[in-house]
Image (tube, grey):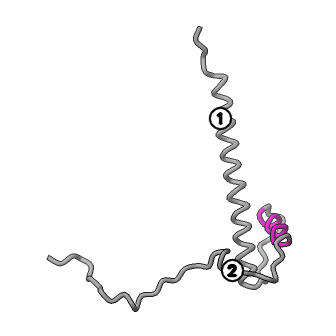
Amino acid sequence: MPGPYPKTTNRSNTTCRSTPTTASITAPAAIPEQVRHLARLVADGALPFPDNLPPVQRALLMEEVQRRRRDRLVRHIAQIIADDIASTVGAIPENE
């Protein structure tokens, strides 16, 4: 009995589109220090994300802002876990 999905043997018509990564994006006009500084301000909420950047610089800035926010979240979670462990160490009753 055939399955619910038709079998296809000709895969030459299918295309796979992927989003560019930083390894494939090169931005000669983007100065890394300026991107880091702007990303820090945007990630901290001091500035809104600029909407007038060229696509390549926009992608680089977005990736850097995401990385900074992700790192901040990971550090925050790690600090909460460390504080929880430290508070439970004193709460464990010692054996004679």
Q: Which residue lies at the image location 76% right of the left edge and 85% below the top edge?
A: 54
Q: Quadrant of the N terminus?
A: bottom left
* Circle nearer the N terminus (1, 2): 2
Q: Secondary structure at mark 1?
A: helix
Q: Residue at x 73, y 75 (%)?
A: 60
**Kind of residue indicated by mark 1:** Asp
Q: Quadrant of residue 85?
A: top right
Residue 43's disc is none
The outermost residue toward the left is 1
Which label sits in the foreground, 1 or 2? 2
Tell me residue 62's x, y (percent): 71, 72
Q: Position of residue 57 (x, y in %)?
A: 75, 80
Looking at the rendered structure, the secondary structure element under dot 2 is: loop
Q: Residue at x 71, y 84 (%)?
A: 55
Mark 1 in CB contact with mark 2 (< 8 angstroms) = no
Image location (x, y in percent) of residue 16: 48, 83
Q: Residue 81: x and y, percent?
A: 64, 40
Any magenta on residue 42? Answer: yes
Which residue type does callout 2 highlight? Ile
Work out whether residue 46 or residue 39 is closer to the camera in this orientation and state it: 39
Crowding around mark 1 (Cα neighbors within 10 Å: few <14, some 14 to 19, many 20+) is few
Q: Which residues make up the magenta segment?
A: 34-43
Above or below, comparing residue 41 to residue 58 in the picture: above
**Most common secondary structure along the magenta stretch:** helix
Q: Quadrant of the C terminus?
A: top right
Residue 89 colored in magenta in the image: no
Q: Quadrant of residue 94?
A: top right
**Mark number displayed over residue 84:** 1
From the viewer's perspective, is residue 73 above or below residue 90?
below
Give the CA separation, mark 1 to mark 2: 42 Å
Residue that carries the numbered disc 2 in the rendered image: 25
The answer to whether 36 appears left or right of 94 in the picture is: right
